């Protein structure tokens, strides 16, 4: 076991709050968990040196940080600063049918319900998920009442000052027939370490629109997960945009717990420098008639490393499932690295499942063609890179977010160079 | 419909008989003295014994791999006998006339007559029975061409310079748990050397048979194709029907020098156990080849037997412009479990690899494709294409795909595709509408599914493969 984990466990033992039974359970599991090595399948390509060496500390002092402004986006703000929920930044008047509360302030009955639901969607095996269970400072509970459509998206921002360590946790539940959009974002300013996990329970006929931005770069360690439980006829549409850092790891789990659920996941990650980004996307089809469509695109430049593990698991009862995964990767330099593993595990016969993965570089002829038309090499490269992922940006349902992310991505591309 | 499909796929295990041959078998158990005795029985030189013992010491330190999607009770390595040979083989018969007729009858029953006149022209056979090679046919004819084809125990004595140089050069002693075990206790297998610029005049073939109870078979095959040579090698295997599980842990090493080509085909038909999963062979095999400049290694396998299969024939594409191919059909039924696939390691420039893997799962079985494609930084212009298709028959089986794709070279191109489907009602309807009975229809659909792989097999093997799947191959063997 690493020193880092030992110290985390020691700190967690000192916490005693409403989550005590869940925390105790997580600690029990942690005490028997081996620190991952190259031989640990889930961390095969992602060494945890940066966690072991991290100097990040929990900062108790009050720090004033606020999320970036996104033009045209009017969101309900839910802000964590260095892991503490900042009530002062929460939108004052919430739409009817939406409630956002801190776990420890919930009334007894609701608290008991939240406690029951805590950590039931996130898979137990995730080491840092357990760390988050044990150490999460503030747990925020969001719920949407039956049949209510919330027009404004909720933006969950986790903001970290330099050298800060934070563990944030949000539980979101959408009651039957409701609609909600949630944006998850982490902003950190170097030498930080954060784990950020969100669990979503999407009841029958509800619709969840989801975004996760993992745009912190540099010397930050960011480990997190978005976990979804879909009931009958529930729908979700998720978009993930990631840049790498010293260590960025994101796990998404989509569980088809009801019939006729529909999940779409579009992920793109663009890495430069010595960055590392690792996306583990798992889809569990536990019930019949579900559909899943995943598109994952990745561009890796310089000395960066990208890891993708796309697992689709069709359980024995999940007949008539349609599941597709498409993974395309561009390598831009001789020192960059892509490790991808699309997995299918299928136990039902009347299903249609497929996955495809490709790794290549920017088409040299296309680059040449653009240059003959007077476009500079670097501009041509940005154009072609953009073409590779633009399709997925176009699919983002929220236009303001798409407009906001486009120039950020363009800027990133212009820094990348074909070597 | 499922019933009809099951019927079409059901077949008796024809090779399940036991031959009544008096054998000399070691007591079960494994320690250094057992390895010394094996080495003694084989009359091996000192260096070989040392090599075995060092592998054994490595093995003791290693852990059994558990990452494959297979489930079986822990193997008791002390309950296995590591050497068994027919008594009649002790005097080393000089010609076929001196070989125990019961042994010859065994092979004849399996459809492999060892009397040269009766054989299909153009195939030389090395027949391995439990721990020893019984006979190697057509040796004179091969010697004329300069080809060495003999049991590996003989090669250790007669060609120590070749064996010393290449044994363990592709699969290192401590490569993995079962390979290390094999290094320590291997008993026989085939050795092939094709001299420079030679095209081997006939197909070479080894037929492995496990007969004795409580034994494991640990064979070792080493094929060296010198510059510009060509060889096609076939391997077949069967075992009696027994209630206990038997371990088969083989190592195959291929060396293809510059411009050489090795084609290695396997029809694996070890006893798969009964429909309740009782008995059957554990087939834990390490097969790997190295390709030097412009060389080519092609693996073709039809896997229908074994209770548990753990097998990844691989290519190390070291030389520029070298080519690796892997064609596989893996059929699992009853309670069989197969975790099989390949590794293509691209090191040289402009190296190419093709992987076509077809999995058919029926009954309560599980079949997995597990593969690795790695492009090293120096593999400029390298290319890989992978296609994995799975066919599920019935709702109690499983089909899985675990491809690892690792690229560190931007000019390398990798494509991977995988699909999973079932024999659809529409396909069945169409065939039946054309007057085919249901069994024929299933045969035809399954056959069409596997066609890409069957066409890579040498003719005789393609026929055997077809028979194994109980499928008429009319008009589809290329």
Image (cartoon, rainbow, N blue to C red):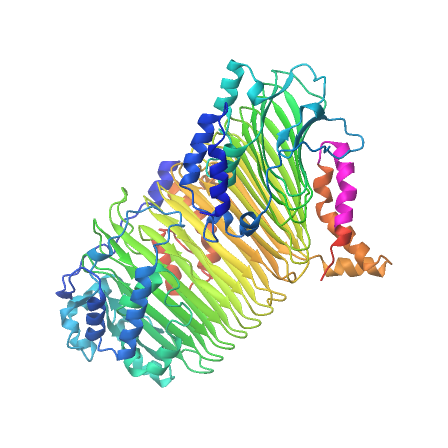
Q: Residue at x 78, y 52 (%)?
A: A414
**Towards the viewer: B381 or B114:** B381
**Towards the viewer: A135 or B38:** A135
Q: Is residue B108 above or below residue B444?
A: below
What segment is highlighted magenta in the picture? A396-412
**Towards the viewer: B23 or B328:** B23
Q: Is residue B244 above or below residue A184?
A: below
Q: Residue at x 71, y 57 (%)?
A: A362
**Towards the viewer: A219 or A232:** A219
Q: Residue at x 56, y 17 (%)?
A: A106
Can see residue B476?
no
Question: Along the horizontal axis of the image, is B226 left or right of A104?
Answer: left
**Which picture quadrant has residue A32?**
top left
Magenta stretch: dominant SS? helix
Split into 4 quadrants, where in the image is the C terminus of chain A?
Answer: bottom right
**x%, y% of residue B13?**
27, 51
**Which picture quadrant has residue B33?**
bottom left
């Amino acid at each position: 076991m690493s020193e880092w984990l030992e110290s985390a466990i020691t700190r967690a033992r000192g916490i005693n709050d409403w989550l005590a039974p869940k925390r105790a359970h997580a600690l029990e599991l942690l005490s028997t968990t081996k620190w991952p090595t190259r031989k640990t399948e889930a961390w095969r390509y992602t060494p945890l040196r940066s966690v072991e060496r991290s100097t990040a500390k929990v900062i108790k002092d009050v720090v004033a940080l606020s999320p970036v402004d996104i033009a045209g986006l009017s969101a309900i703000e839910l802000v964590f600063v260095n892991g503490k929920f900042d009530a002062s930044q929460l939108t004052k008047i919430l739409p009817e049918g939406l409630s956002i509360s801190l776990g420890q302030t919930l009334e007894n009955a609701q608290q008991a319900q939240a406690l029951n639901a805590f950590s039931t969607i996130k898979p137990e095996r995730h080491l840092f998920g357990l760390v988050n269970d044990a150490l999460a400072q503030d747990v925020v509970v969001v719920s949407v009442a039956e049949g209510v459509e919330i027009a404004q998206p909720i933006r969950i921002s986790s903001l970290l000052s330099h050298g800060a360590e934070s563990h944030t946790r949000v539980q979101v539940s959408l009651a039957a027939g409701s609609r909600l959009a949630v944006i998850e974002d982490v902003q950190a300013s170097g030498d930080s370490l954060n784990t950020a996990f969100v669990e979503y329970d999407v009841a029958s006929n509800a619709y969840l629109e989801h975004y996760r931005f993992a745009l912190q770069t540099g010397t930050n360690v960011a480990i997190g997960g978005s976990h979804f439980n879909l009931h009958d006829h529930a729908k979700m549409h998720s978009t993930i945009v990631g840049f790498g850092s010293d260590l960025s790891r994101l796990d998404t789990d989509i569980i088809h717990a009801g019939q006729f659920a529909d999940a779409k996941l579009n992920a793109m990650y663009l890495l430069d420098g010595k960055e590392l980004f690792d996306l583990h996307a798992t889809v569990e089809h536990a019930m019949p008639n579900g559909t899943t469509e995943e598109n994952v695109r990745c561009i890796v430049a310089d000395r960066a490393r990208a890891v993708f593990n796309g697992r689709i698991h069709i359980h024995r009862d999940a007949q008539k499932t349609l599941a597709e995964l498409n993974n395309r990767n561009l390598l831009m330099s001789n020192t960059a690295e892509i490790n991808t593993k699309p997995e299918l595990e299928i136990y039902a016969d009347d299903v249609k499942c497929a996955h495809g993965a490709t790794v290549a570089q920017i088409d040299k002829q296309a680059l040449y063609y653009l240059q003959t038309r007077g476009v500079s090499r670097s501009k041509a490269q940005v154009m072609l890179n953009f073409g590779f992922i633009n399709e997925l940006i176009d699919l983002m349902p929220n236009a303001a977010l798409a407009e906001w992310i486009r120039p950020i991505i363009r800027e990133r591309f212009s820094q990348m160079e074909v070597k | 419909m499922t019933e009809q499909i099951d019927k079409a796929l059901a077949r008796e295990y024809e090779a399940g008989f036991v031959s009544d041959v008096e054998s000399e078998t070691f007591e079960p158990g494994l320690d250094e003295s057992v390895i010394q005795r094996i080495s003694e029985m084989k009359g091996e030189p000192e260096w070989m014994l040392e090599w075995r013992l060092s592998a054994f010491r490595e093995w003791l330190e290693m852990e059994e791999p558990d990452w494959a999607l297979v489930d079986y009770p822990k193997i008791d390595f002390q309950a296995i006998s590591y050497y068994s040979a027919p008594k009649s083989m002790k005097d080393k018969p000089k010609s076929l006339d001196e070989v125990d007729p019961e042994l010859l009858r065994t092979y004849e029953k399996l459809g492999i007559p060892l009397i040269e006149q009766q054989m299909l022209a153009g195939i030389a056979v090395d027949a391995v029975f439990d721990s020893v090679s019984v006979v190697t046919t057509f040796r004179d004819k091969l010697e004329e061409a300069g080809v060495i084809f003999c049991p590996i125990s003989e090669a250790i004595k007669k060609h120590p310079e070749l064996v010393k140089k290449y044994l363990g050069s592709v699969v290192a002693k401590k490569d993995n748990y079962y390979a290390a075990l094999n290094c320590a206790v291997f008993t026989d297998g085939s050795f092939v050397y094709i001299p420079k610029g030679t095209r081997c005049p006939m197909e070479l073939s080894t037929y492995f048979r496990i007969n004795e109870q409580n034994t494991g078979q640990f064979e070792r095959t080493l094929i060296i194709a010198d510059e510009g040579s060509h060889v096609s090698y076939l391997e077949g295997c069967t075992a009696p029907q027994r209630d206990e599980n038997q371990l088969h842990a083989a190592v195959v090493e291929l060396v293809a020098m510059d411009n050489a080509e090795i084609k290695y085909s396997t029809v694996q038909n070890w006893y798969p156990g009964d429909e309740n999963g009782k008995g059957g062979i554990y087939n834990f095999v390490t097969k790997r080849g190295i390709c030097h400049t412009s060389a080519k290694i092609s693996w073709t396998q039809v896997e229908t037997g074994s209770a548990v299969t753990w097998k990844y024939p691989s290519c190390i594409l070291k030389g520029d412009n070298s080519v690796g191919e892997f064609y596989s059909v893996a059929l699992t039924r009853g309670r069989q479990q197969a975790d099989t696939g390949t590794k293509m390691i691209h090191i040289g420039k402009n190296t190419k690899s093709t992987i076509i893997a077809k999995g058919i799962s029926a009954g309560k079985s599980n079949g997995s494709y597990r593969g690795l494609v790695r492009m090293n930084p120096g593999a400029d212009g390298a290319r890989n294409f992978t296609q994995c298709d799975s066919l599920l028959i019935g709702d109690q089986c499983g089909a899985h795909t675990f491809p690892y794709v690792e690229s560190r070279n931007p000019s390398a191109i990798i494509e991977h595709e995988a699909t999973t489907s079932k024999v659809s009602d529409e396909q069945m309807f169409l065939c039946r509408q054309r007057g085919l009975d249901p069994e024929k229809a299933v045969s035809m659909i399954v056959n069409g599914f596997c066609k890409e792989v069957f066409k890579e097999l040498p003719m005789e093997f393609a026929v055997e493969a077809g028979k194994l799947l109980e499928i008429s191959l009319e008009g589809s063997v290329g």
